[in-house]
Image: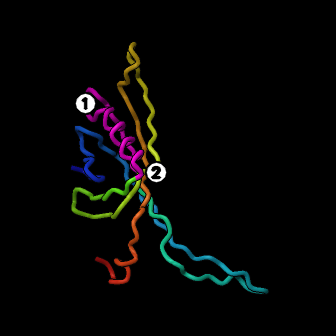
Amino acid sequence: MMMALGTFVFSLPTLAYDQFQRSTSWRHPGSDRVGARAARQYVGPGDDTIRLSGLIAPDLTGTPISLDVLRGMANTGEVFALVEGTGMVYGGFVIGDLNETRTLLFADGAARRIEFDMTLVRADDDSELDQRGRA
């Protein structure tokens, strides 16, 4: 198991990603001041997004049905726990978007190669974790 999003398991037989990108931001709105730079104040965490991308080669690894399962999960609008195979718990995430590109097509339209990328957006409130100094 590489990672689990709710009950969906990312792995070689289902859907393996080959790139993991994470972007985290913090909010520091500014107030304009005359003759000086804007004053900034920390008001809390901003967005936390994870982007996964990879390849399905139905003859070798992965299955196109996995993309349909993820679309079904996204359609529920639910928040899913994201846990890495190492045991690292990232928190609750929603599926922000899911993109696929099908190439190397057979005569019947089936693809030999499907590239995908998806964005997961943090949706839970981690303020309790921060107040305790990390869980």
Q: Position of residue 26 (x, y in %)?
A: 51, 72
The answer to whether residue 51 is left or right of residue 26 is left
| Secondary structure state at the residue bearing disc 1 | loop
Residue at 74 percent of width and 85 percent of height? 33
Q: What's under tag 2, amino acid-wise?
A: Gly
Q: CA distance from mark 1 to mark 2?
A: 28 Å
Q: How many numbered marks appear?
A: 2
| Placement of the C terminus among the 4 image quadrants | bottom left
The residues colored magenta run: 52-77
Q: Amino acid at mark 1?
A: Leu
Of circles 1 and 2, the one toward us is 2
Judged from the image, the secondary structure of the residue bearing numbered disc 2 is strand
Q: Tell which residue pokes out farthest to the top in this image.
A: 107
**From the viewer's perspective, is residue 122 above or below residue 71?**
below
Residue 8 position, x and y percent, is 27, 47
**Between 91 and 40, which is closer to the camera in this rendering?**
91
* Residue tagged 1: 60
Check residue 55 for magenta coloring: yes
Contact flag, marks 1 and 2 (Cβ < 8 Å): no
Q: Measuring 24% from the left and 44% from the top, which residue is drawn there?
A: 11
Position in image of residue 129 (x %, y %):
34, 77
Q: Choose between 74 and 76: the one closer to the eye.
A: 76
Graded by Cα atoms within 10 Å as few (under 14), some (14 to 19) or many (20 or more), the crowding at tag 1 reads: few
Residue drawn at 29 percent across, 41 percent down? 15
Asked whether residue 29 is drawn in magenta, I would say no
